[in-house]
Image (spheres, grey):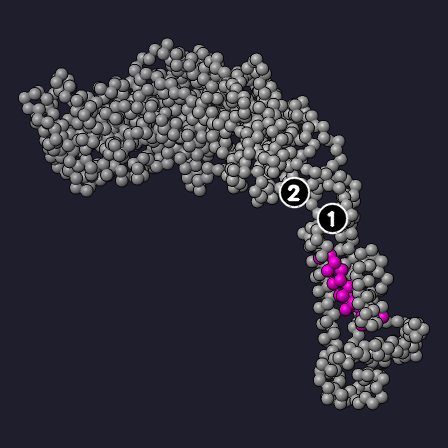
Amino acid sequence: MKMAWTLLLLLSYFGVFAFGTGKNFSSSSRPSIVNVGAILTFNSTIGRVARIAIETAMEDVNRNSSVLRGTKLAIKMGDTNCNGFIGFVEALQLMEIETVAIIGPQSSTIAHMISHVANELQVPLLSFAATDPTLNSLQYPFFIRMTHSDMYQMAAVADMVNYYGWREVIAIFVDDEYGRNGVSALADSLDAKRCKISYKAGIPPVSGVSRSSIMDILVKVALMESRVIVLHTNPESGLMVLSVAQYLGMIGNGYAWIATDWLSSMLDSFSPLPLETMDLMQGVLVLRHHTMDSERKRSFSSRWIKLTGGSLGLNSYALYAYDTVWLLAHAIDAFFYQGGIISFSNDSRLPDAEGSGLNIESLSIFDGGKVLLNNILDTSVMGLTGPIKFNSDRTLFHPAYDIINVIGTGFRRIGYWSNSSGLSVLPPETLDMKQPNRSSPSPQLYSVIWPGETITKPRGWVFPNNGKQLRIGVPIRVGFKEFVSSVRGTDMFKGFCIDVFIAAVNLLPYAVPYKFIPFGDGRMNPSYSELVNKITLGEFDAVVGDVAIVRNRTKNVDFTQPYAESGLVLVVPIRKLNSGALAFMQPFTPQMWCVTGVFFLFIGVVVWILEHRINDEFRGSPKKQIGTILWFSFSTLFFSHRENTLSTLGRFVLIIWLFVVLIINSSYTASLTSILTIQHLSSPIRGIESLRTSDEPIGFQVGSFAERYLSEELGIPKSRLIALGSPEEYVIALQNGPKKGGVAAIVDELPYVELFLASQCKFRIVGPEFTRSGWGFAFPRDSPLAIDMSTAILTLAENGDLQRIHDKWLTTSVCSSDNTELESDQLHLNSFWGLFLICGAACFISLMIYFFFIIRQFSHVSAKESNPIAEEGPPKLAPNAHDKRRRPNVALHERSPLVTVYKRRIDNVGNDEKRIFSFYERRSDPCLGRRQEGQYDREISGLGMNWWDKEELPVNGDYENRRQQKEEI
C-alpha cells in the first residue's frame, strides 16, 4: 500500500497527469452509460487478441437489450506497454472517470500493484490473464481471476512428470512474480509426487534479454543431471531459450521439454508459424487452457476469422476476455436490479494535499463496489469457454488443460488434464459426467513424438558432464574381508560387494564416473547406520558394501534390488551325540509314548466289548479275558494278532487302528534308523526363543543392525549383548562359553555366518532365520540410478555372473565332508494327533451304535416278558435254562425289578447263543417251509441278536463241532 501511494505522489509531483476538481458523485439508479476500464498490453500475444475480444463483447452486450436494459457499457482501454509503472499510471487514470470495474491487467506483476489501489477504492479488478497463484482473495479481496491459476497448470505438469516416471526436472522461468510464484507452485506439486526441481534458472524479466545471457544459463543446464526441462516464460524469452537450446543440441535425443500455456497461446494466435520457428519446438509438450467445445464457440470462431481477416488466431485468453465482459455486464445489471446506484465518495484517509499541487482528492471510493463484487461472484453464466461459476475460494470451477505435442508444422493433442480426473485421453466434461477415478487402468495419454523425432520416452537424466564424480562411501571392515576390503597403499577396494557393484555399473547404458571414499578407522567395524545417514547429509552420493536393507534405513535412502540373501541366524557350539542303551526310546517323546500305550489298551477294550458276546475267543474267565485284551491290543503292533473279529463294528475299529499302527511303526523305524546310523550333534539352545528367555550372554558383530534388533525388537537387555569384531573373537567367545566370560550363542547375518562356518566345524546354525532381508547398494531418495542398478543386478542374477562372483570369493568350505547333522527334534504328539483323533472317533461311534442296539433289544425283550399271552413259535428262554423250577416269564417279570431281569439276561447269553445255533440248524433244514422263516427271524431278534450278526453264525452243524471241541478241552 505504501508503495502505491509513493508512486502516486511522485506522479503528481512531476505532473504526469492532472485531475480536475469537478466530479459528479451521483446519478440515476440506471444511468445511460456505465464506465469500465481495461488495462492491456496491446503489442503482446495476449493483448492483441484480448483487445479485439473485449471490443466485440462490448458491442454484443450493447446490442442485447435484455442485459443492461438501455444502459450502455463503455470500456476505456489503457496500454501498459509491458511496463509495470505505466500500467500503474493507467490504472489511476481509469479510476478518475467513475470507473465501476477494471478488466485486466494481463500481467501478474501489474496485477499485484493495481490490486492495492482496487482494494482501497473498492473497484473490482477482473483479470483474464494474470495467473500468478499468489494473487488470492485473502490479500486482494477485490481481485477476481477470470482464468485458472498457475497452481493447477503446475499440478498438471507434475502429473505429467510422474506419469512418465521422471523424478527431477529443471525449471527455466522469467524472474518476476509470474515466473517465480509459478515455479514455487510447481515445486509444491512435484513434492507431492515425490519429485523435485533439481535446478532453477531465472531469466531477467526486462524486455530484450540478450542471447548471451540465455546461452550462459543453458550451458549450466546442459551440465546438470536432469534432462527434463520445464519452460515457464513469456513468448519473447521462451523462443530465445528454444533457439539457444537448439544451437547447443538440447532439442534432441534424451531431452524432454514441457512448456506452459505461453507457447500454446502463440501457436493458436499465429499459426502457422514460420518453419524456422517451428523447428525450435519439435517434440515439445505444451499445456493449453481447455475450453469446452460447443456450437456457440464454433460460431464465434467463424466470426473471429471475419473480424481479424484471418491474420490473428483465436486463443483461450481471447475467449476468457470475451466472457469477462459478459459476466461483468450481467453483474452490473443485477446491481441495478437490486436498486444500486453508481456513486463515489472521497476517502477521508487520504492526506490533505492542498497547496502542494497534488490532486489526490480526485481518487474516490466506489460506494457500490462491495455489492458489485458480490454480484460478480454470485453470477453464473454459460460463456464461450463453458460454464462460468465461482466456488468458495473465488476460483473458477473445473480447471482443465489440453496437452499438445508439437510435430512438424503443427501440433497434435495427446490428452487432457483436469483437477478432478487427472490425465486422460477423454475430454474433462465427459469424465465429469462420470465418477472421477484417477486410478483408471486405461491409457492416460497418447503416444508422443519426442525431441529428436523418436517415440522412445527419454530416460530423463544422465550423469552430469561437469567433471564431478559420484562419491561412494565404502566401509573399512576389520573382519570378513572377503566381502569388502581396501587394497593397501591405494584408494582401491576389493571383495564380493565391490565386484558386484563394478559388474552392475558396466551393464549400465551410460558411463558412471565414481570414486570410492573409505569410511571407518580400520580398528573396528564402522556403524552402518551412520554410513547410510551420510547420504542424507549429502556427504556421499551412494554407499557400496555389505549393507543390510532394514526398515529404519529405507526411511532415508533408496536401496537397489538385493544382490545377496541376508537374515539373522543363531550360531552355537555343538557336541557330538552318541547313541546309548536307551537309544530305542529317543524317536518318541514321553508324551507320545504314553498316549500310544493308552490307545493300545483302549483299542483292546473296545474290541472286547464289541466281540465278547458272539466270539468265543473273547470269552472265558475274567483273568482269561483280561489277558486276551492285553495280548490282542499289543500284538496289533506287529500285525500278529490271532483272534478273529466277527462283528462288523469290531472289524471297522480294527482296520482303522491297524492303519494308525502302520503310520506310527513306519515313523518310529525311520527315526530310529537315523539315530543309529548318522552321527548327530547336540546343543542345549534350540532357537532364538529359548535363547531370549534365558539369562546367558549373546554375541553380535560390531556395526551390525543385530544389536538394535535384539534390544528393541526382542527386548533383550543390552547388558547381555557382547560386541565381537572378527571371526577369531567369535571362536574364542563360543569356546569359552558363558562360564568363562564368553557367549552362549552369536546372532549375525547369514552371509557372515556361512563364511565363518566354512572353516569352523565345531559350531552350527540352530533354528531358522528369524529375519528376512538382503544386501543392497544405497542411493539418495528417488535416485534414478538406484532403479537402473537394480535392473543391472537382476541381469547379473539371470546370466549367472552373480553366482560366479559369489563362488570366487565365498566358496571355501572345509567342513562339507562331515557326515553329521544337528540333532533333530523327536517325534511329538502334534504330528500324530490327527490319527489318534480319527481312531478315537471311530471307537466312539462304534460303541454308540453297539449300545444303541443293546438298549433297543433290551426294551424289546422287556416288552415281551411283560405280555401274559405267549406267542406261537419256539419256546421262550427262561432266565435260567437249567432251573427246572422256573416259573413262567410273565410271573417272573412281574415280581422282579428291571435291573434283575437285565442281569439275568446278561448271565444267560451263553444259553441264548446255544439256542440261536439250534434255530439256525433248523432253518438250514431243507424240509423247513417258507412260512417258518419269519418266525425264525422273530426268534433271533427276541434273543438279542442283530441283523449283521446273523451272517456270522455257524452253518451246517458247525455248532456241534465247536461244542465237541470245547468238551475235549
Dividing the picture into quarters, in which one does residue 138 lie?
top left
Earlier sequence position, callout 2 versus callout 1: 1
Question: Quick check: 601 above or below 721?
Answer: below
Dividing the picture into quarters, in which one does residue 659 lie?
bottom right
Image quadrant for the N terminus?
A: top left
Task: Residue at 77% x, 69% y: name it.
Answer: 609
Question: Quick check: 684 above or below 55?
Answer: below
Give residue 47's position: percent from left, percent from top: 29, 22
373 in magenta:
no
Give residue 626's position: percent from left, percent from top: 80, 67
Task: Residue at 59% x, 33% y: name it.
Answer: 748
Determine if residue 86 is in view. Answer: yes
Residue position for label 1: 586
Furthest residue in direction left, as rendered: 355
Q: What stretch is highlighted in magenta?
A: 595-616
> Disc 2 on helix, strand or loop?
loop
Give residue 408's position: percent from left, percent from top: 47, 18
